[in-house]
Each structure stands twice: as C-alpha cells, then as structure tokens.
Image (tube, grey):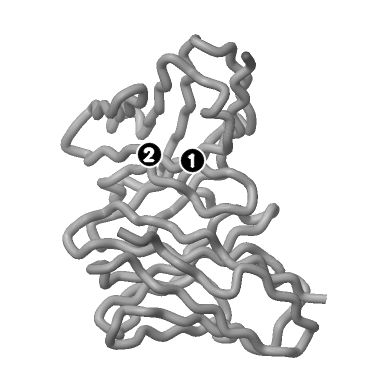
C-alpha cells in the first residue's frame, strides 16, 4: 500500500512558467513533509520542507503548500528554469522520527 | 562543511557474495538512515541508527544489516546477495532535533 503517491510520472513546462508538482498521502500520522530533487546516479538534494502545523512555506523560487484535510501537498517552482529539470520526490515522516516514506517521483522537464 | 560521503561509489558482486557499504555523516549529524532505490520499488527505507543503536527498521529481510560506530559513521551489510539486490544504496544523515535528511551520492551495487 503506497502511503505517499505522486500521480504524475512526468511534467513538461516552458522556461519562465510555473511548475506545480503534486503529492498525496494516506497516513494521518505523517506530520512533516519534504521535497527532494534528484539527478541520475546522485543522491536526492533537499529542497524545502513543511510541518503539518503550517499550510505554506516559501524559499526563494520554491513554495510548498499543504492541505491537511485533503492529505495533499504541492511544490510550486516560479519561474521554472532549465536547470530545474530533474526528478522530484516528495517524502513524509511521522513524529517518531527519521524514517522517510517517499513518493514515486515526478520527472520535470523545463524547456528553454 | 563536507557533505555525506559514501564508499565505494560503484560495486559489482556475484550472487551469494556479501557486501559492506560505508557512510560518513556530515559533522555533527548523529542519525544515519539507509535507503534502497530501484526502478521498480522506488526509494525504500532500510534502517536508521542513532548513537550506535538501530532506532527504526524497514521491511527488508535479515540479510540486510547495519551498524553505527561511536564517531557516527555507519556501515550496512548485505549477505547472500541476490540479483534483486542490485540498486542504488543511499545514506542520509540528520542533525538531532531536525527532520531534514541530507543524502550522500549513493553506492551503485550491481549483482551478477
């Protein structure tokens, strides 16, 4: 049973436009959510996170929105740049600590 | 600060052999988690160590084991290798009291 799902395996966006990556979860015990960016043959790079007590967190071009009632989070990248092309993973953890449950990833392609 | 380092970066083994992978955390990070990434199963949690004790364990067979040393460096061992163990093995470290995990570059294990 997949507790964290990214239903879009890929997304293509024009440079300068907004990229929106979505993630759904089923486990109500999850209270911390993270987004990672990954290039092939490299480890994931931490991008941004959000605690369940918030509904929005911003860091530069990246904003994460959390809708607890819908068990949904999204990552907005504005403006998108070609260097943003990578696979993006959302991950969740519960208050027990350091076990991340990952979604399957969304491949983002930003076209110049 | 140096990032998370993993050695070796690439490894080729044959079925039935055993393998040991190493992870050195970011200075000051005492929690070390291990993940397996495969095309079919995505990123899956193996186990987490803190202060030389295993705190969490994922759903992997007993052939997968780990340990942590007093300097927080960690090793994971896979015995009696199977073809399906071919994967990218990632280590992630965390500062106590924080949820963000920072990943190393991974060890690519190929089992022939």
Above or below residue A102? Residue B108 is below
Count how many numbered circles sit on residues in the image. Answer: 2
Do the CB atoms of the residues marked 1 and 2 lie less than 8 Å apart? yes
x 50%, y 70%: residue: B6
- B74 horizontally vs B79: left or right: left
**Earlier sequence position, callout 1 versus callout 2:** 1
Residue B56, x across and y down, in percent:
36, 73
Label 1 CA crowd tier, 10 Å (few <14, some 14–19, many 20+):
many
| B61 or A81: nearer the viewer | A81
> Most extreme residue toward the front, as rendered?
B1
Q: Which mark is residue B62?
A: none
Task: Report which quarter residue B53 is drawn in.
Answer: bottom left
Task: Report which quarter residue A57 is drawn in.
Answer: top left
x 77%, y 74%: residue: B83
Measured Cα–Cα span from mark 1 to mark 2: 7 Å
Q: Secondary structure at mark 2?
A: strand
> Most extreme residue toward the right, as rendered?
B112
x 23%, y 28%: residue: A55
Residue A23, x across and y down, in percent:
45, 34
x 35%, y 56%: residue: B101
Q: Which residue is mark 2?
A: A47
Q: Mark 1, chain letter?
A: A
Q: Which residue is mark 1?
A: A37
Residue B11, x across and y down, in percent:
69, 74
| A102 or A29: nearer the viewer | A102
| B100 or A30: nearer the viewer | B100
Look at the image and tell me in which quarter the N terminus of chain B lies.
Answer: bottom left
Above or below residue B62? Residue A35 is above
């Amino acid at each position: 049973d997949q507790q964290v799902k990214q239903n879009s395996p890929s997304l293509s966006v024009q440079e300068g436009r907004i990229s929106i990556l979505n993630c759904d979860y089923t486990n109500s015990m999850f209270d911390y959510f993270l987004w990672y960016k990954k290039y092939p043959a490299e480890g994931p790079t931490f991008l941004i996170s959000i605690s369940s007590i918030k509904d929005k967190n911003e860091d530069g071009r990246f904003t994460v929105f959390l809708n607890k009632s819908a068990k949904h989070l999204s990552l907005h990248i504005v403006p998108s740049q070609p260097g943003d092309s990578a696979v993006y993973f959302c991950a969740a953890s519960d208050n027990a600590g350091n076990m991340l449950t990952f979604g399957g990833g969304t491949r983002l392609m930003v076209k110049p | 600060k140096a990032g998370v380092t993993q050695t070796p970066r690439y490894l080729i083994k044959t079925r039935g052999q055993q393998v040991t992978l190493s992870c050195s955390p970011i200075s000051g990070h005492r929690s070390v988690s291990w993940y397996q990434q495969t095309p079919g199963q995505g990123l899956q949690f193996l186990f987490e160590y803190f202060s030389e004790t295993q705190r969490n364990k994922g759903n992997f067979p007993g052939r997968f084991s780990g340990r942590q040393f007093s300097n927080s460096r960690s090793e994971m061992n896979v015995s009696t290798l199977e073809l399906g163990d071919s994967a990218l093995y990632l280590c992630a470290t965390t500062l106590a009291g924080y949820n963000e995990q920072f990943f190393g570059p991974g060890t690519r294990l190929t089992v022939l």
